[in-house]
Structure formats: C-alpha cells, structure tokens
C-alpha cells in the first residue's frame, strides 16, 4: 500500500506528473490497477462475496452424447390392446444427461476385467511379500528386481524405522487404528502401482512370485483350454459400496426415526457392500439355446479381438451396476492425480424413462427410433438387427450380434437403440408402475424387486420388441446372450451451451 500512496502522491502533483514520459505513465497505471485488484480480491470488506471458485464447464465423457432434458409422452402412443395396460401414455419430464453412443463393448468391459485382475494380483503379491519379510523391507530389497519384495506396500504403519516427527498426521492416525489386517480386503496400506506386473512365466523374478501367479492367478495346467494358459475367473471379484436411498427414504418417513435424537448417528446402516464376480458368463451362448451349435461364440466372443467392438453379453444387472461404479472410480482416480480437476458425476444405468426418451431421439409419437412405423428403408434394407422372419435370423445380414456402431444412429447420435442387444435399465419392473411413478424424472427403484426392466429388443427378437415403448423384464441375477447395457451420467448444471466437447 505504500507504493500506491506514493503513486497517488505523484499524480496529485500535476505538474510533475505531466513531465513523466508516456511509457512511465503506462507502468504507473498498471501498478495502480494491480494494487486495486489485489486489495479487493483478498478482503470481503464485510460484504457477502461467496466462496470463490473457478467457473465450471461440464466435460462430455469420451464416447457419450448429450441428451437434453425435456418432456415427452412416455408409453404406447399407438393403439395396442395387448400392452396398453402395461405402458399407458403419460407425459413426463427428464433432466439432461449424457449417454453412451453405443452399447458397452467387449473391449470396454475387458478393461474393467483387466483392472480387477491386476488389482487382485497386486494384492496377493503384497500379502506374500509381507509374509516373506515380516517387516518393512530395506531400500536394497525394494530395489531388487529379482524378488517379490518390490511389490511390498508403500506404507506399513508398523514400521518403527521412521521417527514420529517425520510421519504425516494421516500415518499417525493409521497407526492408532491398529495393526494391519493382512488377510482382510481393506488394508491400511497402499499397493505399489509403480511396478509393472510380469505375466511372462519365463521372466518371473523369484519362486514366491511364481507360486502366486501359477497357483492363484492362473488355472492348473490340466484345466487349460486348447493348451492356452487361462486366468482363474473365480478370483475376479469387485468390491464396492453404494447408498441405499430406498431404505433411507423409508426410514425418514417413520415417526420413530424422525423423533429419534440419534437418527444422524446411524448413517452406516444405509450403505450396502457388494462383492461379486465380474467375469461375463460365456456359457449363455449354450444355455440360452438348446440343441443349437453355438460353441464358437462360447469360446471366442468375449476375448477374441475379432469381437472387441461387439456389445458385451452374459452380464447380469448387478455386474452392469458394478461396471458403472468402477467407471466412476476410474475417472475420479485420474482426476485426483491432476490438480484442480473436479470429480465427475456418477456413471450409472439409465432409468426406464431416460432410456425411452433417448431412444425416441426427439421424435414424438414415433414407433421406432428412426421414426416411422416400418422396419425397412425405401430401398428395402432392414434398419436394425433383429429376427425379421420365422427362423431367418440372417435376413438382416447378421446371425448374432453386430458391431456396436452398425446401422444409422437416431437423431441424438445413439446407435442400436432398437435391436442388436436388449439393454438393462436401472428401474425395477412393475406392470402398473406408470400409474404411480412421478411425472418428474420417473423411476421405480426397489432393492427387493429382483425383476428389472429390459428395453430395446435384441438380435433374436421380433420387430414388436424393437419399439421404443415396448417393455420387457429379466431377473437381476440372470445373464443372457442377448442382453447388454449402456451407461449414463447426469449433466451438472442447466446451461447445455457451456459443455466442453473434447
């Protein structure tokens, strides 16, 4: 402020100020401006200025498209005596959201499987390193490329070689929690992600590493298929927590809960832990079709690179939910590594209302995503992958599924909203749900209802199930060769013009 006072003193002496050359005047003016801005930005001067934050611009996730929210007529728009009670017309409104342009492909789901595989392997290697040493290794041992010790966790609360004054507050807090639980899932240490995993058996660093990989990660040699070393898919489990909003809502409505002084001390009871196997059920190609030769699809569909861009199948509703949770975690973990990168909204399955709204592509009262009531174009070509004729699956040029970006997208840029594979939704199925769900972001959420809404029809279905208003159901723990999924993400904010398109 002393500098500002001196500048103003010079300016007040008009004659002296006029003698200053033009370049000097520019410097003086700049200093004054900086001083004023600096002074105003640091102090509120007793006024309500709010918490300063950078302007937020939504970022469109890769491979997704923005579906701008609006109102539409949900349900059967044409007269259908068989289904009018199942899906009666109802005007509803949905908010804006991002949606995957295509169904989740085998290649995309394999990224999830590989992440879980690597995490399980690192976890087992860390436990074995702890068992081998029994204490924190020395720097020489950590740097030994020919031992399992390099996979030792980054931090051991039991390490006494570090003085307390050199430890962070969080490290001291972890020590107060107690000793490490080496056999549990959640541990008080971080896995070492800087060291690459070694999959080539000829390059295993030591015996301990080889034992973990050959006895736990891979199947025994007598269980290999066609002589190919095979991952033990039973160990590929994903653990996560989710908030049971249905249970929370019911608790809030109970007078005993509202009147309780301890109602906010029981938050833990509304969180549910899920641990489930995430590898797709490849046997669905055989189980779904009796007396049918589908062994090639069973053997190669998920892992062969020829099918990388095809929609993943054999995934249950629960596995689709786990994938969405992992996708959120995977993105947010990256954002945490970048300074000033905000966390993203959760990826999830679309609600039934969101799916139908997106499938219509902005067209009101349309039978199919492409608009008209016909399943062929003006050249007689089929507009989707389904079963056109009795037993003639290949009449539309596809016997099973097709690549995710096949046929023309609808007006929202979404592919295969009709046919190819039917798609899981977030919503539970109830025949009369249209009568009682809200008209604002309608959704029937029920943990106990194991029946989930499936939309869109598939490669094995007739044209009736391809209609945007057709509803079907499947049990959440079931997996089929004709059911896949795609994810959505809520749009944060209300001004869609601010979207940052990469």
Image: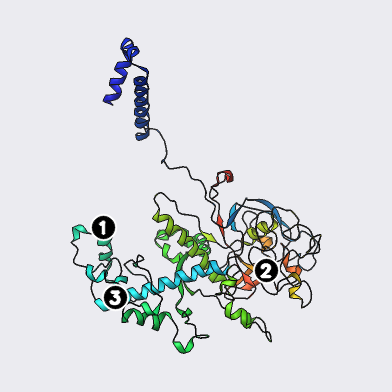
Quarter of the figure that contains the N terminus: top left
Q: Position of residue 186 (x, y in %)?
A: 36, 70
CA gap, disc 2 and disc 1: 54 Å
Secondary element at image label 1: helix
Asked if disc 3 and disc 2 are in contact, CB closer than 8 Å, the reply is no
Q: Is residue 449 visible?
A: no
Which residue is outermost to the front? Answer: 202
The quadrant in which residue 445 appears is bottom right
Q: Position of residue 177 (x, y in %)?
A: 28, 66
Task: Kindly identify the residue that appears in the image at 23 percent across and 73 percent down.
Answer: 135
16 versus 219 height, above or below: above
Q: Are marks 2 and 1 in contact (CB under 8 Å)?
A: no
Q: Secondary structure at mark 3?
A: loop
- In this orientation, which residue lies closer to the viewer: 410 or 457? 410
State which tag comes first along the sequence, 2 or 1: 1
- Tell me which residue sits at (35%, 82%) in the image: 211
Q: Determine the CA span between mark 3 and mark 2.
A: 49 Å
Dot 2: element? loop
Q: Which residue is mark 3?
A: 147
Q: Position of residue 432 (x, y in %)?
A: 69, 65
Residue 438 seen:
yes
Question: Is 330 left, or right, of 7 in this rendering?
Answer: right
Mark seen at residue 169: 1
Measured along the vertical axis of the image, is residue 178 above or below residue 289? Answer: above
Of the numbered discs 3 and 2, the one sitting upstream in the chain is: 3
Which corner quadrant of the image does residue 404 belong to? bottom right
Nearer to us of marks 2 and 1 is 2
**Residue occupied by mark 2:** 420
Q: Mark 3 near mark 1, Cβ–Cβ under 8 Å?
A: no
Q: Which residue occupies the foreground of this view, 368 or 255? A: 368
């Amino acid at each position: 402020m002393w500098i500002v006072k001196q500048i103003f003193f010079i300016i007040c002496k008009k004659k002296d100020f006029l003698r200053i050359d033009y370049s000097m005047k520019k410097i003086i003016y700049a200093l004054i401006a900086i001083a004023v801005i600096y002074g105003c930005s640091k102090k509120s001067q007793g006024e309500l200025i709010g918490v300063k934050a950078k302007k937020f611009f939504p970022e469109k996730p890769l491979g997704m498209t923005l579906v701008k929210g609006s109102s539409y007529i949900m349900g059967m728009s044409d007269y259908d005596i068989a289904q009018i009670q199942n899906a009666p017309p109802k005007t509803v409104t949905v908010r804006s959201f991002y949606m995957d342009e295509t169904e989740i492909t085998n290649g995309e789901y394999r990224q999830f499987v590989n992440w879980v595989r690597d995490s399980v392997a690192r976890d087992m290697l860390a436990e074995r390193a702890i068992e081998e040493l029994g204490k924190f290794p020395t720097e020489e041992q950590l740097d030994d490329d020919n031992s399992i010790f390099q996979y030792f966790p980054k931090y051991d609360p039991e390490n006494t070689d570090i003085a307390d004054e050199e430890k962070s507050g969080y490290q001291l807090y972890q020590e107060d929690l107690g000793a490490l639980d080496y056999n549990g899932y959640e541990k008080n240490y971080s896995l070492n992600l800087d060291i690459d995993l070694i999959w080539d058996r000829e390059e295993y660093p030591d015996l301990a590493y080889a034992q973990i990989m050959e006895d736990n990660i891979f199947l025994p040699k007598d269980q290999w298929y066609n002589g190919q070393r095979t991952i033990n898919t039973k160990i590929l489990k994903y653990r996560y927590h989710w908030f049971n909003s249905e249970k929370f809502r019911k608790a809030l409505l109970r007078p005993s809960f509202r009147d309780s002084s301890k109602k906010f001390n029981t938050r833990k009871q509304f969180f549910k832990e899920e641990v489930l196997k995430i590898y797709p059920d490849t046997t669905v190609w055989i189980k779904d079709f009796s007396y049918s030769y589908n062994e090639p699809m069973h053997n190669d569909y998920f892992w062969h690179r020829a099918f990388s861009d095809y929609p993943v199948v054999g995934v249950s509703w629960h596995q689709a939910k786990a994938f969405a949770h992992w996708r959120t975690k995977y993105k947010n973990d990256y954002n945490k590594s970048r300074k000033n990168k905000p966390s993203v909204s959760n990826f999830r399955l679309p609600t039934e209302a969101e799916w139908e709204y997106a499938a219509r592509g902005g067209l009101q009262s349309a039978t199919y995503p492409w608009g008209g009531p016909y399943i062929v174009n003006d050249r007689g070509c089929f507009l989707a992958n389904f079963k056109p004729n009795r037993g003639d699956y290949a009449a539309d040029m596809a016997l099973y599924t097709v690549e995710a970006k096949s046929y023309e997208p609808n007006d929202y840029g979404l592919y295969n909203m009709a046919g190819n594979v039917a798609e899981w939704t977030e919503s539970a199925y109830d025949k009369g749900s249209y009568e009682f769900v809200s008209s604002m972001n309608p959704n029937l959420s029920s943990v106990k209802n194991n029946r989930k809404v499936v939309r869109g029809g598939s490669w094995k279905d007739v044209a009736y199930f391809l209609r945007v208003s057709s509803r079907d159901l499947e049990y959440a723990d079931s997996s089929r060769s004709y059911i896949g999924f795609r994810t959505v993400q809520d749009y944060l904010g209300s001004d869609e013009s601010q979207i940052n398109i990469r």
